[in-house]
Image (cartoon, rainbow, N blue to C red):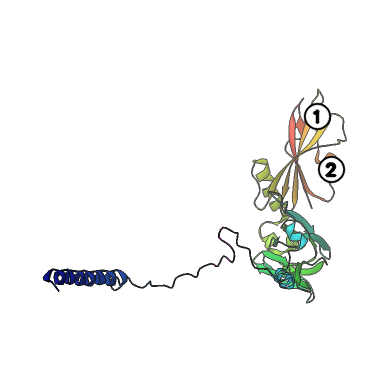
Amino acid sequence: MSSLSRIRRKHISSYLFLLSLAVFFLASPPSGYGHPLYPAPPKIKSGGKKGSRVRPPKTNKAVKKNILGAVPPLPAENEKPLNLPSAVNAVHISVKPGQTKTIYLSRAFINRISFSHYIDYARTSKTGDVSVTLNGRNAIVVFSPYMIESGAVKKVVYPKVPSSILFKSGNSVVSLLLVPKNIPPQTVYINSFADFKSRSFHSNGGFSKYVAKVFRDIYAQRIPKGYMLKKKDIIYKSNYPQVAVKLVKEYKGRFTVYEYLIKNLSNNEISLSNKEFLHLRNNILAISLSNEHLFKNTFTRLLIMGE
């Protein structure tokens, strides 16, 4: 063979060697980048022709029924919206010795019963559905729910049967009958008349000094300690045509104090006395007129403390 063919053959062999080196470097990148740090996600099999939609796998009806039945449905009471008022007023009741009072409490919420003295103990029946926690002068009352199972469905049920409870507070034992109702949480203030016979009450100056302090605060446009003010606008029938009687305020606390406005409707000066207004309330404990003499179209304030 000629020298020219040898040179061509040598160039071709060198070219093939360089080409094999390029293929080798392209197929094998440098170390650290050749393999991923995590396995590749599996490919989704279409199961059909290109461009067709992927159909979900069929589910057995029996299996589907068991899956849906594993989660119990909500009770009908839980699906109803709660229309709770923005504010719930406290309840004030008075309990005489030997008397049992009935009070309504919320079935599903936390209630509070407050006394004027420290609560020594509370007694409930062992079979009752009520739980009581004492904290000083306050008792936290909650009705204990129970569970009813009907197959796979579980339902929370709150008690509807009333529960009785005895409180020992100060020198009095108060008996209450708690009736559960579908109402907002309640705050109940208990006033026991046995407390006013105790030594602690007399050590402060007795009942007359207590009444004088309460009336003095009200006449000075102050709310007495331990009382709550509620405005009223009620006209009462008077024993005399020349006198108008109107209830304007009510103070709730240990007792209930009613404030009236008495107006002289006649053209003459008149004189008034406390006994002329005893018909306004039952079980009056104290009564006071700020002014017993009224001129034409003038007013006076009347305070009555009742049970």
Residue at mark 1: 270
- Using the rendered image of the protein, determine whether residue 286 is visible from the camera's viewpoint: yes
Residue at mark 2: 280
Residue 244, placed above or below residue 30: above
Q: Residue at x 71, y 68 (%)?
A: 68
In this picture, which residue range is highlighted in magenta? 43-57
Of labels 2 and 1, the one closer to you? 2
Outermost front residue: 1
Instruction: State the SS at label 2.
Output: helix
The three-letter amino acid code for the residue at tag 2 is: Leu
Mark 2, other Cα within 10 Å: few <14 / some 14–19 / many ≥20: few
User: Measured from the top left, where is residue 76 in percent x and y?
Assistant: 77, 60
Give whichever of 279, 15 is nearer the camera. Answer: 15
- The image quarter in which residue 111 lies: bottom right
User: Measured from the top left, where is residue 51 in percent x and y?
Assistant: 56, 58
User: Measured from the top left, where is residue 201 in percent x and y?
Assistant: 69, 60
- The image quarter in which residue 202 lies: bottom right
Residue 211, placed above or below residue 135: above
Outermost bottom residue: 126
